[in-house]
Image (tube, rainbow, N blue to C red):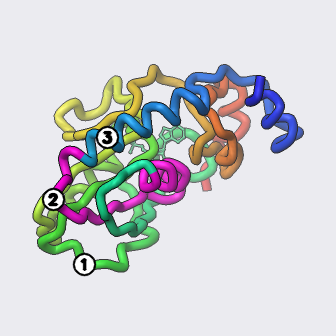
Amino acid sequence: MEEEVLTVATDRALPQMEVVLSAEQIRRRVYELAHEINRDFMDETPVVIGMLKGSFIFVADLCRAVAIPHHIDFMAVAAYGAGTAAMGAPRLLKDLTVNITGRSVLIVEDIVDTGATLSHIRRLLLARQPRRLASVALLDKRAHGDPELPIEYVGFKIDGGFVVGYGLDLAERYRHLPYIGRLNPTQTEENDTRV
Ligand code: IMP
């Protein structure tokens, strides 16, 4: 009910969508993930790397839920244009501003689909010789992706389809939604014009 009210207040043109994860479900799971991270990085000060733009809300919530000291930085890669289909190797749009050599690093991803983006980022960061490299993904959508790709912390495993909200977008829309919703194929096709 609260989400319906927020929706009306924040986006007049919001299409009908199935709510896959409510704001409350996400909130609880973020605290559980933070608990695991606290335990596993107890004596360390990891560099938490948020993958822009999709993970910006997740990072903001996760870093406030985590009790251990940590540093925060961001990277940006472009995997998709305005549409919903992946387009080959991700392009690095923004690099880190801190040196991670010898540091513990936690990559924060919004969603893993094929795993190509995370694999690429892991390779890039491993070449800088961190002491330890782990990843947390809020959503794991891998059905055909690389099952070998290590993701130490996963918020939720979800079925296919294109999801938006809580930082995730379709052509820059819907990032502000406090929940995660699934768009139907007609809604995503309308935006499948790649830039
Ligand atoms: P991958 O490289 O195929 O794993 O795709 C990962 C990236 O694609 C994510 O960081 C998102 O930016 C984007 N992505 C994949 N699936 C979705 C989705 O359902 N909604 C929004 N973005 C998605």
* Badge 3 or badge 2: first in the primary sequence: 3
Is residue 185 something one can see in this rendering? yes
Q: Is residue 80 visible?
A: no
Residue 156 is a magenta residue: no
Residue for badge 1: 99
- Give the x, y percent position of residue 3: 74, 30
Q: Which tag, 3 or 1, sits closer to the chain's start?
A: 3
User: Which of labels 3 and 1 is toward the front?
Assistant: 3
In the picture shown, does residue 137 fall above or below 20?
below
Residue 35 - label: 3
Work out whether mark 1 precedes mark 2 in sequence or the reverse, and give the earlier one: 2
Q: Secondary structure under badge 2?
A: loop
Mark toward the viewer: 1 or 2: 2
Span highlighted in magenta in the image: 39-64
Q: Amino acid at mark 2?
A: Asp
Residue situated in front as seen by the camera: 9 or 188: 9
Q: Which residue is mark 2?
A: 43
Count neighbours of disc 1 (C-alpha within 10 A) and say few if under 14, some if 14 to 19, many if 20 or more.
few
Residue at horizontal 79 percent and vertical 37 percent from the top:
6
Q: Quadrant of the N terminus?
A: top right
Report the amino acid beneath label 3.
His
Identify the residue at image location x=62%, y=45%: 169
Task: Return the residue nearer the eye: 50 or 88.
Answer: 50
| Picture quadrant of residue 10 | top right
Quarter of the rendering occupied by the C terminus: bottom right
Q: Residue at x 33, y 34 (%)?
A: 154
Q: Which residue sits at x=56%, y=31%? A: 162
Image coordinates of residue 51 in percent, x first then y, are 43, 57
Measure how far apart labels 1 and 2 are at the Cα level. Answer: 20 Å
